[in-house]
Image: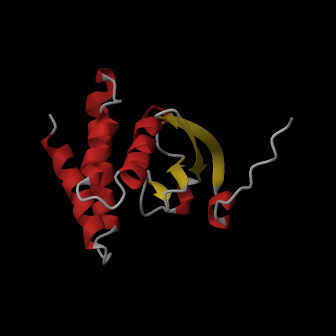
């Protein structure tokens, strides 16, 4: 018996900026994600997120070899550790456990730059908790050799 088609519940802006779609497997669960056009948010290169813990997305400009760990970061932070203090750092630690030694240094540099951009992007936000979370992750990255 055929399965009925799955209803696409993504917001229109996400559908309209889709470049590709994929599925990431984490803890036995298949989680769909959308690769979005990088021009959607030019002020934040390499953006990634998990809208309401329902719609995982990543910018097309993130190198393919970096996508899986960053998607895992979003899943852990916004579902497994949702609303917990320290969730971004814990998600970062989990993310880094997937990085092969041969790309370790370049990956850490990439993420340092991303978190610096993220801090700048959110500097005027009133969400002090989120700003503290991303600042803490940036500090962890700064301490990694």
Residue most extreme to the front: 1
Q: Residue at x 46, y 55 (%)?
A: 49
Question: Would you say 6 lies left or right of 127 here?
Answer: right
Q: Quadrant of the C terminus?
A: top left
Residue most extreme to the right: 1
* Along the viewing direction, whichever of 78 and 60 lies nearer the viewer: 78
How far across and down, in percent of the image, does residue 77 sit? Answer: 36, 51
* Along the viewing direction, whichever of 33 and 28 lies nearer the viewer: 28
Question: Would you say 55 lies left or right of 115 here?
Answer: right
How far across and down, in percent of the image, does residue 107 sit? Answer: 32, 35
Which colouring convention does the figure follow? Answer: secondary structure
How far across and down, in percent of the image, does residue 113 sit? Answer: 29, 49
Task: Please tell me in which quadrant of the rendered image residue 126 appears.
Answer: bottom left
Question: Would you say 30 lies left or right of 137 here?
Answer: right
* Along the viewing direction, whichever of 132 and 27 lies nearer the viewer: 27
Q: Residue at x 50, y 46 (%)?
A: 61
Q: Is residue 85 above or below residue 3?
A: below
Label tally: 0
How far across and down, in percent of the image, does residue 1 sit? Answer: 86, 35
């Amino acid at each position: 018996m055929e399965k009925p088609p799955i209803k696409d519940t993504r917001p229109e802006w996400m559908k309209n900026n889709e470049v590709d779609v994929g599925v990431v497997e984490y803890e036995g669960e298949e989680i769909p994600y959308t690769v979005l056009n990088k021009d959607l948010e030019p002020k934040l290169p390499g953006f990634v997120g998990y809208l309401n813990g329902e719609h995982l997305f990543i910018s097309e400009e993130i190198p393919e070899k970096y996508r899986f760990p960053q998607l895992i970061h979003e899943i852990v932070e916004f579902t497994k550790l949702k609303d917990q203090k320290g969730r971004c750092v814990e998600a970062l630690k989990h993310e880094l456990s997937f990085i092969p030694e041969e790309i370790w240094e370049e990956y850490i540099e990439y993420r340092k730059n991303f978190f610096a951009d993220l801090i700048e992007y959110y500097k005027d936000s009133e969400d002090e908790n989120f700003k503290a979370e991303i600042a803490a992750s940036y500090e962890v990255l700064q301490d990694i050799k």
